Image (cartoon, rainbow, N blue to C red):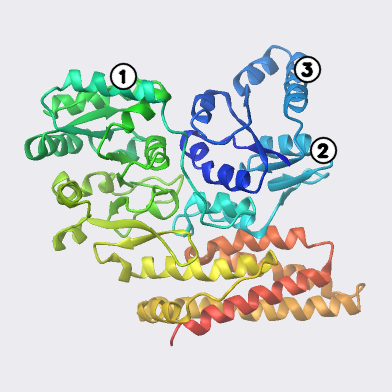
Amino acid sequence: MRILIINLTRFGDLLQSQAVIHGLRQQGHEIGLICQQNFAPAATLLDGLSHMTPLPGGRLLSGLDAGWPDAVLTLHAWMETLIREFMPEAVLNLTASTAAKLLARRFAGAGKISGFGMDEHGFGVYGSAWTAFFEASTRRRGCSPYNIVDLFLRASGLHAPAMHRLRQPDTAQSTLVGQSLRQEAPACSGHVAFQLGASEARRQWPAEQFAALGVRLWEHFGLMPILLGTPNERDLAERYLAAGGPGIDRVGRTSLPELAAILHQVRLLVSNDTGTLHLAAGLGIPCLALFLATAQPWDTGPYLEGCCSLEPALPCHPCAFGSSCGQDMRCVRHIAAEVVWPLLASYLRDMTWTCPPDTAAQARVWVSSRDDRGYMDLRSLSGHDTEDRSLWIRLQRHMYRQFLDEVDGLTTTPPPEAELVQSAADLSLELRVRQRHILKQADALLHLFQEQGRLTLMRPAGPHGRQFLATSQRLENLFDGQDAFNVLSRLWKSLTQERADNLRNLIAFGDLLRHTLNTWRNLLPE
């Protein structure tokens, strides 16, 4: 089929849909893409597209201000051109916004919509339970146990693993870039790329720390840093150079194809959580990444095995989206170049990430790997895999994967019982007691939900229907008030609404969730 993918996200998330494109191409489909116009150059880095159409969002919005009839005609003409040139037979929408859902509904016609959709009444619908989980898990930090690439794959109906490799840079351009870099630093033995900026200042490792790292790279290995970033990050390059850091300054001076060509010339990339990080991973370039403030490697880490990710070893990290910091952005300063350097040096010497024992006080250090199902996973180098936070994330990975596959009617095999039992047993007694209490409350409410639902089936005109809805709301509120189970609040609300027209299906869904939560509770020793 001709499948139209809608991805109206930013640079990094757009690149992370590469695995979906490869997976669908392997099934024999022809792939078209709608992306935001300002990220259209990034779409040229995606491999396997048959058609790409940028959405002129800025022009349409300015047109609405000038006169909405003309703007509507412009949008209609744009849509008709896409349909005429590509003629999609199915739509995969990877963006949860209302605009993207409206586009999906318009282009699907009588065809199938996967991912995020909209019904005839304007309510959001999900192509699968995995899609609903994708949206629900982004609400709070700590509820995102899967890499976004794996969630894209599952929302697309694909199973991990899938090849995630971007289009390789043009050979001639790579050659020219390599020659230019050698001319600027003829005495160096090679290059390491530094991505200094990030989407927010609080997610940027200080330029002075990058500079301290650059000095060590030059003195110990003769490697010259290449400074990367956008034009509005020029001040970071100036701060880096003012701090005495050596480097070839390309901040704000590269196109996306040139950026890809530069990354092809380096030994590795040191980066904040940015689009450049995901570009490097998609090109197969080793990465060392720092995750500060709201960023965490479990969900937006580089989708490439063998990459190293660091996050501050602080109880407040990662912080919630939209929250203000009460600790004067302590996390930004918590990891020093002295902590990063031994990791970097060990990798440059023998291609192995090694950290000293005292690293654990400043950073949680992870190396990306694959789990038994092929999903991207993280392995701790700093001993933080035994912390409650890490153990709970691992339990979430197993329990949600089993539950979501069952909801979607997929054949699934149970997770490794020994690993589950060990992870649950290693949790602190305080956390086990608290989580068991919450799960026990949820079990009681789900039992009541099922009984009230069965009474409603027998006596539709009785009072049980109102009680049934009230119990459903109580369950949603219970989950919503708990950080560890918050994802279930949104998931319960979304999936029960989709089943609201069939009471028997709704009761069956409650039974499946109840079985999952009881399995989870039984894993937690008292």
Q: Residues within 10 Å of mark 1 (few under 14, many from 20)?
A: few
Residue type at the position of mark 2: Gly
Crowding at label 2, few (<14), some or many (≥20) Cα neighbours within 10 Å?
few
* Residue at the image position 73 percent from the left and 63 percent from the top: 496
Q: CA distance from mark 2 to mark 1?
A: 47 Å
- Which-is-in-front pick, marks 1 and 3? 1
Circle number at residue 109: 2
Which comes sooner in the sequence, label 3 or label 2? 3
Q: At label 3, which amino acid type do we have?
A: Leu
Q: Position of residue 138 (x, y in %)?
A: 52, 51
Find disc 3 in the rendering and name its residue: 73
Residue occupying the point 76% across, 67% down: 469
Task: Indicate left or right for 92 with 361 as reference.
Answer: right
**Which of the two discs, 2 and 1, sits closer to the camera?**
1
Whichever of callouts 2 and 1 sits on the residue coming sooner in the sequence is 2
The C terminus, quarter of image: bottom left
CB under 8 Å between discs 1 and 3: no
Relative placement, left or right, of 379 versus 469 is left
Q: Which of the 4 image quadrants contains residue 474?
A: bottom right
Work out which quarter of the rendered image holds the N terminus and state it.
Answer: top right
Say which quarter of the image contains residue 329. Answer: top left
Using the numbered discs, state the Cα–Cα distance from disc 3 to disc 2 in whole angstroms.
Answer: 19 Å
Q: Residue at x 80, y 62 (%)?
A: 500
Three-letter code for the amino acid on which mark 1 is drawn:
Leu
* Camera-nearest residue between 299 and 345: 345
Judged from the image, the secondary structure of the residue bearing numbered disc 1 is: helix
349 above or below 433?
above
Q: Image check: 260 left or right of 384?
A: right
Q: What residue is pinned by disc 1?
A: 176
Q: Secondary structure at mark 3?
A: helix
